[in-house]
Image (tube, rainbow, N blue to C red):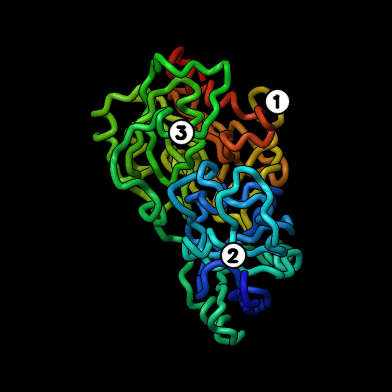
Amino acid sequence: MGMIKKAILALEDGLILEGVHFGFEGESYGEVVFNTSLSGYQEILTDPSYAGQIVTMTNPHIGNYGINQADAESRRPWVEGFVVRELSPVVSNWRSEEDLDQYLKRNKIIGIQEVDTRKLVKHLRDFGAKKGVISSVDLDSKSLVEKAKASPSIVGIDLVKKVTCAAFYDFNETLMPEFTWPDEVVKTDKKYSVVCVDCGIKLNILRKLVQHGFRVHVVPATTTAEEILKLKPDGVFYSNGPGDPEPVTYVWQGMQKLLGKVPVFGICLGHQMLGLALGGKTFKLKFGHRGGNHPVKDLKTGLFEITSQNHGFCVDAGSLPGNEARVSHLNLNDQTVEGLRHEKFPVFSVQYHPENSPGPHDSDYLFKRFYQMIDRGVW
């Protein structure tokens, strides 16, 4: 890594943490959040849902297995900054193509290590996610706190347009040369066509849809309901994505026009969009849910799932109109809404990420449920 260079992380409420710079040199702003996953740092870095955020890893040792292109969840990393306790000085994995320091340099993302991440995470849990700044060029604490205060909030801002694809494309097995197909998956004779509305979609969601028998067509988030229906899909999928769902009116108002006309499945931001489309409201969680071990209960079956999550906003259960909209899943840590379904329309959603498979197969049934909803009208 060369010469050791100091860096500072400053929060808007005055918390200052000193550390050592790595990755790209400079200054970066964002909402400071934390993720409790023990591994998967590359998937986290490349998850478009983290646009606008500085991510702190609670696992103290990060970077030990390096970076490889096959594990990326999108075309590039989206985080604004990366905070770790210790950047591994050794990379040891046969799949590694470069180390984390090189990767962040190449993608112009600033990192800070040797930070007391335990102190930082406890602070965020006590006082909520905060706006912050990482800098290796300005080491004046008072100046950085003022910069953090003046930086933009993610509340009320549309971040989806920043991460969505630019044009329609088909997704299929040929785009996944590194992916090993399970024996039980039928790779040919895809029966149903699904339009995926890309609000910041992760590649593994697309892989899962193909695995479960769909022909997958991806469209930008700005695609209208009329344009989607012209494609004559058998189903429509709404993806994960970053930030506050309420300002992204073109997505959830477009979804409203599809309800009852075509089966709909949403994950993460797509779930929040469904809550809004059904007439509900969303609110910002104190510090969000980000990690690979969140317990969720399926209210229909009574079964529990270990889930992977990454979100800072949530559907307000009390705001849902008293008609056919139903809460289908609950978070067992804080009783927040983790899933929605409709009694009349073929539509359902979950707040968590079934494609991440921390269970590892606990949530795989959701993709099967989407297929059955289209195939047999059962959900």
Mark 3 crowd level (few <14, some 14–19, many ≥20, 10 Å Cα): some
Please tell me whether mark 3 sits on a helix, a strand or a loop.
loop
Q: Nearer the viewer, residue 242 or 67?
A: 67
Q: Nearer the viewer, residue 82 or 194?
A: 82
Query: Residue 208, how many percent across, how many down?
Result: 51, 29
Closer to the chain start, of discs 3 and 2, is 2
Distance between mark 1 and mark 3 Cα atoms = 35 Å
Distance between mark 3 and mark 2 Cα atoms = 33 Å
Query: Residue 203, how many percent across, how many down?
Result: 47, 39
The residue at which mark 1 appears reads as: 302
Q: Is residue 349 above or below residue 166?
A: above
Amino acid type of the residue tagged 2 in the rendering: Val
Query: Residue 199, how many percent across, how many down?
Result: 41, 45
The residue at which mark 3 appears reads as: 176
Amino acid type of the residue tagged 1 in the rendering: Gly
Amino acid type of the residue tagged 3 in the rendering: Met
Placement of the N terminus among the 4 image quadrants = bottom right
The residue at which mark 2 appears reads as: 32
Please tell me whether mark 1 sits on a helix, a strand or a loop.
loop
User: Residue at the location (40% across, 17% down)?
Assistant: 190
Task: Please say if the residues under marks 1 and 3 sit with CB atoms less than 8 Å apart.
Answer: no
- Between disc 3 and disc 2, the foreground one is 3
198 relative to 24 in the view: left or right: left
Distance between mark 2 and mark 1 Cα atoms = 35 Å
User: Residue at the location (52% across, 31% down)?
Assistant: 179
